[in-house]
Image (cartoon, rainbow, N blue to C red):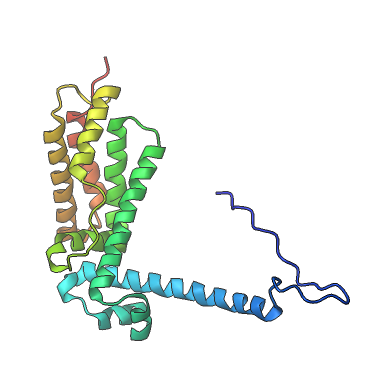
Amino acid sequence: MRRAAEPPAILDTVQPGSAPNSTTPSRNARRGRKTDRPLQERAVRTRESLLVAAASTFERVGYSGATLEEIVLHADATKGALYFHFRSKADLAHAVLAAHYQQWEQILQDAAAADLDAFDTLGFVVHALARANQTDPIARAGVRLGDEREQLESDAPTPPVDWVDYVTKLLRKGHRDGSVRRDVNTAASARVVVASFYGVDRMSARLTGRDDLIKRVDEWWTMLGPSLLAQPT
């Protein structure tokens, strides 16, 4: 993506005999900005490390089983660094859920940008979700924390997507663009798609730690997809 043009730098020059311009940053101020940037970048890296460590811990032992001590050790950070970024274990869990939901929104944006028909959009989305759940600790932890929402405090972020509603609308769009069979009951089919994807994901997680998730989703979609796909005329 093309970077926005940066504003021209203000030159720290003073004409002979004139007073320094009060709006011109001093050399010390510029040095301060240069010093601040590495600190800011390090803070971002530390927060990301803590978030990934928390996600890995939540995914492995659940919210109630996770401890801040284990998360800090996994992140190779200090308690002080953790409390600089997060107030509590609940705050960490909320941040993991929020990052997970941002992944959902990105997947839907990518699917829309692909400019596919409704049936292929659904295939794109379920396979993108499967790849995230297989490989990304934030996604894997988000799934488990979503199952354990009753253990979290009431201000936990809410899912931005109602998957049954999303798939229902997508199948209705498929009726209009001709990619989904006209006799498909969109609401009932959406419930089946979401529930069965959830089941495939959980079975793979339980049996293989999701190592075979992509293969299992491919099998599932090969069987389920044709029941939705409109036949060429």
Query: Relative to the observer, which residue lies in front, 131 or 194?
Result: 194
Q: Report x, y in % for residue 20.
A: 77, 76
Q: Report x, y in % for residue 205.
A: 18, 58
Residue depicted at 13% across the width and 45% down the height: 195
Residue depicted at 70% across the width and 78% down the height: 27
Query: Relative to the observer, which residue lies in front, 20 or 194?
Result: 20
Q: In this view, does 161 lie to the left or right of 8?
A: left
Q: Report x, y in % for residue 62.
A: 17, 70
Looking at the image, residue 10 lies above or below residue 65:
above
Quarter residue 156 falls in: bottom left
Quarter residue 44 falls in: bottom left
Q: Report x, y in % for residue 51.
A: 33, 70
Query: Relative to the observer, which residue lies in front, 233 or 219?
Result: 233
For the image, the number of numbered tags is: 0
Q: Is residue 232 left or right of residue 31?
A: left
Q: Is residue 202 among what the camera can see?
A: yes
Looking at the image, residue 221 lies above or below residue 28:
above
Q: Is residue 221 among what the camera can see?
A: no
Looking at the image, residue 101 lies above or below residue 164:
below
Residue depicted at 30% across the width and 51% down the height: 104
Looking at the image, residue 71 lies above or below residue 153:
below
Work out which residue is located at the far top of the displayed protein and give it: 233
Query: Relative to the observer, which residue lies in front, 76 or 90?
Result: 90
Residue depicted at 26% across the width and 77% down the height: 88
**Quadrant of the drawing holding the C terminus:** top left
Quarter residue 202 falls in: bottom left
